[in-house]
Amino acid sequence: KAGVTQTPRYLIKTRGQQVTLSCSPISGHRSVSWYQQTPGQGLQFLFEYFSETQRNKGNFPGRFSGRQFSNSRSEMNVSTLELGDSALYLCASSLGGSFTEAFFGQGTRLTVV
Amino acid sequence: AQTVTQSQPEMSVQEAETVTLSCTYDTSESDYYLFWYKQPPSRQMILVIRQEAYKQQNATENRFSVNFQKAAKSFSLKISDSQLGDAAMYFCAYRGSGGAQKLVFGQGTRLTINP
């Protein structure tokens, strides 16, 4: 069974640009969550999508957005990149119920220069 | 809002010995889930063990066990017979009840295994 796949693995962007990250969940999983990991702030929840609907959102500015497609694949978009957006972005998928656990991808390392 | 605190930024242990990582959390909910995740240098978060708050019995997974003290809001991880492959960042995480999958993480503990 394939795991959670995140693409690309590494990305370098310039301030002011926008970026799109992709996450393919484990087959059958309907929930996809996104996290930002930085040395200073640790792991912070960005948002969760379940059956194409945003179910939960963290405390991030509107420059951070996401969506989920009918096949449960999810994309995360960051517009007008800032240096502080440099981070490891992790995606997690799960079945979405109360007793399910989250499985993480290997992350996308975004560097903003 | 829920918070998770890991007070040990770094820990080290001799191979084959036992080590305990600490975690405390704050919540007003009575039903929730607690997790320990391991993040090796490959960066992929791997679930080590989980605990449902309504279960009094402490969870155990092979060499990994937890000490869950609900009244004290404490959730420590014990690793027995430490192996070199256990070296990683360990994160304690909280998730509320219901279907929403939002995890609240602690700051992590870097575990070093000395051969």
Image: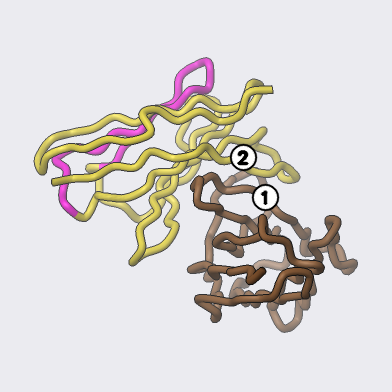
**x and y, in percent, of residue B3 in the image:** 52, 70
**x and y, in percent, of residue B14 in the image:** 69, 75
Say whether residue A80 is magenta. yes
Say whether residue A36 is magenta. no
Three-letter amino acid code of the residue under disc 1: Leu
In the rendering, which numbered label is found on residue B35?
none
Chain letter, brown in picture: B
Q: Nearer the viewer, residue B100 or A36?
A: A36
Q: Residues within 10 Å of mark 2 (few under 14, many from 20)?
A: many
User: Which secondary structure lies at badge 2?
Assistant: strand
**x and y, in percent, of residue B35 in the image:** 67, 58
| Residue under the point 44% across and 48% down | A35
Report which colour depicts chain A: yellow
Location of mark 2 (residue): A103
Three-letter amino acid code of the residue under disc 2: Phe
Give the residues in magenta: A64-83
